[in-house]
Amino acid sequence: MCGPFDISNCASQETGVKSGMEENSFILKNVHVVSCARDHRTFPQAAVIVRKGRFDWIGPLPDLPDTPDLPVRDGGGMIMMPGLINMHAHCGDTLFRGLVEDLPLEAWLQSVWTAEAAILPDPATCQLGTELGIAELVMGGVTTIMDMFWHAGSGFDAAAKAGIRWASGGIFFDGPGMDGFGPEMRFDQAAALFADGQEFTGTLPHGAYTVGPDAMRAAYELAMTQGGFFCTHAAETVAEQAIIQDRYGTSVIRHLKALGVLGPRSVLAHCVHVDDHEIALMAQTGTHVVLNPMSNLKLASGFAPVPAMQAAGINLTLGTDGPISGNDMDMFLAMRLTATLHKAVSGDAAVLSAGDVLHMATLNGARALGAENRLGSIEVGKQADFSLVDVSAPHAVPLFDALSHLVYAASKSDIRDVFVAGRAVMQDRQVLTLNVPDLCARVAALQPAIAATLEPPL
């Protein structure tokens, strides 16, 4: 007997299609489609045809074309939404979840880096933590992740194993990092990653306070020459601003603009402490911003001026940051915090709509990756990256507006099934591509060694 989305190994009783057909081609009926297209179009009581990993037809169920060559599956009235795009994560830091608490960023980083230096010289350990992080995010409806971490090659390997989309590349620091690379070797490693033919490759210097001007420019120029993206932390804390002001006589964003590293293929994570002029600079250069509300709140960094940045026309995206700074990686929490925090701060309940925030978690992320034409929304011709969201739990009933429900009521535990390019990577809450119990057990076994890295040990 086949399950509701086990379409590669069984015949469809409704169509009589024999087994052996392509697993990424099927008909999905009885779903409520929240497309996340620019017009926010939704399709209640809808059907979708996926053919060779792409959306081939979307519309009302009664209008479903006769397609006898494809198996038909029933979505059970669930919401069908695009795969979420997490534009800022450090998945490998699952190894250190909850290790350092109740500190501001700078003091927190010193403890984190001590622990990382003791545990992460081994690429296999990095990959273990990254696989656990990917599993967590997949179970929360995420299909594309931009990740900044040591041993970037192991991250690409983990993502390929999991069957998801991965945006990463060489990380830049002045001086040797946890991976043991010096600046010259780090540049060579970053350059080599572009030759691997990955879908999304870039350069990821850590930040202006840890990477000098020459290395920052070199990272940007390498990414631009290779057709990749550039990503760095920027303007996250008041202390960071003070360091840059003392060192270069200017603010973080002005410093990055003077270096020539802002632009339409540049992604800045955080941008909490920015003024109107800096917002204008980012807007004029087409620079993208990743909001990370959970970690910014927990580390007492502040919160980004989202309404002002949106009004200026900056493409705003969402991220979870890492599981040491936010403890879990929950894009639904990121959406809800973004939508509600700025209503309270501004005193304007309409300052951000649910649709605005859903775009930040989907289509805007695709735009920042240069992939808006093929990812980020459920539209004909795009890649079939999507999730099915259960709406049968008490917190989901009644359902008047599926779009607002996803932002204000849904949680990551409501995700039942996740598809990437039409292939199931999670089915009925079971990740199909990774052995999640084994990952949890292996990471738990490292806990004593990780705890011993702190002074005093936990």
Image (spheres, rainbow, N blue to C red):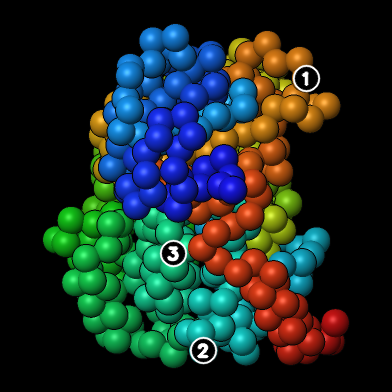
Specify whether 133 is left or right of 340. left
Side of 341 relative to 434 (left or right): right
Q: Is residue 9 shown to the viewer in this render?
A: yes
Query: Which mark sits nearer the N-terminus, 1 or 3?
Result: 3
Q: Report the residue at 72% width, 77% height from top.
A: 441
The residue singled out by tag 2 in the image is 122
Query: In the figure, 335 relative to 413: above or below?
Result: above
Residue matched to label 3: 159
Question: How busy is the neighbourhood of tag 1: few (under 14 within 10 Å), some, or many (20 plus)?
Answer: few
Residue 113 in the image: state x and y as whole percent. Answer: 61, 78
Residue shown at 41% from the left, 26% from the top: 48
In the displayed structure image, the side of residue 74 where residue 382 appears, left or right: left
Give the Cα distance between marks 3 and 2.
18 Å
Identify which residue, 18 or 307, lies in the foreground: 18
The answer for how far apart the CA atoms under marks 1 and 2 are is 48 Å
Front position among marks 1 and 2: 1
Q: Which residue is mark 1?
A: 397
Q: Tag 3: Cα neighbours inside 10 Å, few (<14), some, or many (≥20)?
A: many
| Image position, residue 136 (x, y; %) | 63, 57
Q: Quadrant of residue 205?
A: bottom left
Tell me which label, 3 or 2, sits earlier in the chain: 2
Dot 2 lies on which element?
loop
Q: Secondary structure at mark 3?
A: helix
Q: Residue type at mark 2?
A: Asp
**Residue type beneath disc 1:** Val
Q: Nearer the viewer, residue 437 or 305?
A: 437
Is the residue 341 above or below the residue 197 in the image? above
